[in-house]
Image (cartoon, grey):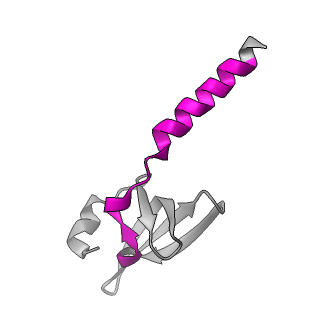
Amino acid sequence: MSSALMITLKANEWVWSDEHNAPCRVIEAQRLWGQTTCRVWLPGKDMVVRVQVEDLNLYKRPKFGRKLASRTSQQLLGWLML
């Protein structure tokens, strides 16, 4: 990922971490001494880690958000119907 694309990274945005081979959510981005790093949350491991921005990919965004919300709402509706 180039530093020009870093502008598009915002807190709460979902991206793909090549280092962890998993989707993650951006908590914050920081540029210091010419290096850009991001603190991200890995929901699969329930961990917050710092990664180089080059290890994040905007083009492999996970698409599970909508499906997860739909499945959760279906489960809640099923529990209410009991």
The residue lying at 20 percent from left, 70 percent from top is 4
Q: Is residue 50 above or below residue 16?
A: below
Please say whether residue 56 is one of the residues in the magenta stretch. Answer: yes
The magenta span reads: 54-79
Q: Main secondary structure of the magenta part?
A: helix
In the image as oriented, which residue stretches furthest toward the left?
Answer: 4
Tell me the residue at 61%/25% (across/down): 74
Query: Relative to 72, is 36 above or below?
Result: below
- Give me the residue at 25% from left, 63% from top: 7
Residue 61 at x, y = what percent?
39, 55
Which quadrant does the C terminus fall into? top right
Instruction: Identify the image quadrant of residue 1.
Output: bottom left
Pick the front one: 48 or 42: 42
For residue 52, which quarter of the picture? bottom left
Q: Residue furthest bottom?
A: 33
The residue nearer to you, when weighing 62 against 32, is 62
